[in-house]
Amino acid sequence: MTPGTIKISIENIETKFRVETGSDFVNIKTCYGEKKNLSDLINEINEEDVFYDIGAHLGMYSIIIAKKIGEEKIVSFEPLEENMEKMKKNCSLNGVKIETKNTALSNVNKERCLKIESFNSTQTYLTESKNCKKR
């Protein structure tokens, strides 16, 4: 696939995203298969809310919600540096500045490894640190 920019509109919120892989294209074009959930969120969230995007990937949720309630109310967490960089480019492309944290979140306070499925960078999970492999 040739990298490029695609536009999506959901609940009258216009956004654009830089996509570099076929997987990125499908994920953004289909809203990760979560169009109804995203529409419901857009309709339910209001300007008094704060939105935490955990596993932000390319920033689709963060950017769309920032356009609804304001960028200062968004905090995005993305553990993969390569995805974080893509997300920052997408934020810039959409004219929003979102607070980003390059970390994974868990209910356990200990060092863990992030397992990445080779077929899709949206599929990650934490494993015991004894099984870690350096990238």
Image (cartoon, helix red, strand yellow):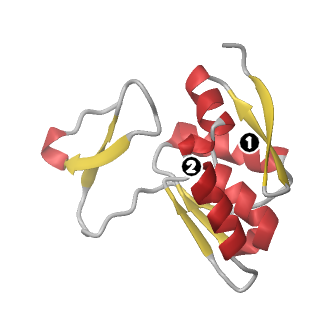
Residue 98 in the image: state x and y as whole percent: 71, 62
**Disc 2 residue crowd, few under 14, some 14–19, many 20+, Cα 10 Å:** few
Q: Which residue is drawn at 67% across and 59% down?
A: 39
Is 77 above or below relative to 131? Answer: below
Residue 116 in the image: state x and y as whole percent: 35, 35
> Is 53 left, or right, of 73 in this rendering?
left
Label tally: 2
Residue 70 seen in the figure = no
Q: Residue furthest top?
A: 1
- Residue closest to the eye, 70 or 98: 70
Q: Residue furthest left?
A: 130
Q: Nearer the viewer, mark 1 or mark 2?
A: 2
Q: Which residue is drawn at 64% across and 50% down?
A: 59
What residue would you read off at disc 1? 89
Label 1 sits on what residue type?
A: Lys
- Residue closest to the eye, 42 or 135: 42
Label 2 sits on what residue type?
A: Glu
For the C terminus, which image quadrant?
top left
Numbered disc 2: secondary structure: loop
Q: Which residue is drawn at 86% across and 53% down?
A: 95
Q: Which mark is residue 6?
A: none
Residue 84 in the image: state x and y as whole percent: 58, 46
For the N terminus, which image quadrant?
top right
Quarter assignment of residue 110:
bottom left
Q: Which residue lies furthest to the bottom in this view?
A: 48
Is 52 above or below relative to 97? Answer: below
What residue would you read off at disc 2? 34
Residue 67 seen in the figure = yes
Numbered disc 1: secondary structure: helix
> Is 75 left, or right, of 55 in this rendering?
right
Q: How far apart are marks 1 and 2 (CA)?
A: 22 Å
